[in-house]
Amino acid sequence: MQRIGVFGGTYDPVHNGHLHTAMALVERLDLARLHMVPCFQPVHRDSPSTPTEHRWAMLQQACSAHPALHADNRELRRGGPSYSIDTMQSLRDEYPDAALFMVMGADAFRHFGSWHRADDFLQLVNIVVVHRGGEPAPDVAASAWGSAYQPLLGEIVCSRGALTSVQCPLWTTSSTAIRQTLAEGGDIGSDVPAAVAQYIELHQLYR
């Protein structure tokens, strides 16, 4: 069974923390491909101020060096509020027989019950809750969806319906911090791929 992951975000900009997490997920989940999906209009946070075409171009640059990572613009093409359930349905239609793994952060999972059609996700995908090293592990087994919990990633062979959590490498940067550093004229060379840094400089983003 083909194993496909989905990792969404604003990617404003995409940074090395995103990529380190993505590659760790590819290895830990034994994924054939991980779709990196930039949202068009977030539902639970402010919309990015950076034009869509720049966020998309930077993500393409970042993913191009990693064959397992696939920059996926389906939410940008769809427009409107970026409801994750619509994205998961689209991917399930595209990969009807694959094991689909939707990745979300621990903070997002704490508010998962407020998501549009939250109870429908496990009918389409497996859910993987990511927490960073040094952070407390989320108690997903005690959540409203705890009956779907499976503790061992390697034993998840179903196409949908499983819930688990995984610890990924700790990173110290964030998109917010990168934007602030650039606004103050600082250097972000260690925080983003070289191609992304060059793109930001070329287009004078976040100044």
Image: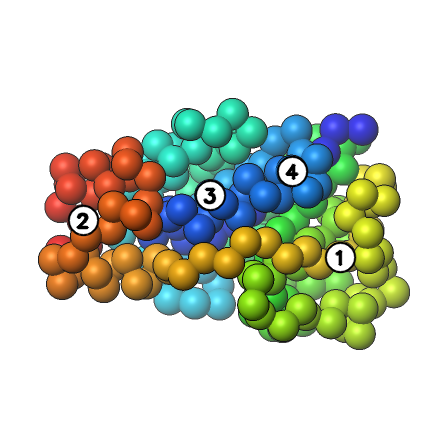
Q: Which mark is residue 27?
A: 4
Q: Could you give the CA–CA distance between mark 3 and mark 1, rounded to whole angstroms?
A: 21 Å
* Mark-to-mark CA distance, 4 and 1: 16 Å
- The answer to whether 148 is drawn above or below residue 139 in the figure is above
The residue carrying mark 3 is 19
Figure check: 123 above or below 173: above
Residue 102 position in % (x across, y down): 65, 49
Task: Give the Cα separation between the discs numbered 4 and 2.
Answer: 33 Å
Nearest to N terminus: mark 3 or mark 2: 3
Which amino acid type is shown beneath numbered disc 4? Answer: Glu
Disc nearer the start of the sequence (4/1): 4
In depth, the one of 62 and 37 nearer the eye is 62
Classify 10 Å Cα crowding around label 4: few (below 14), some (14-19), many (20 and above). Answer: few
Question: The C terminus lies in which quarter of the figure?
Answer: bottom left
Q: Which numbered disc covers residue 205?
A: 2
Residue 123 shows in this picture: no
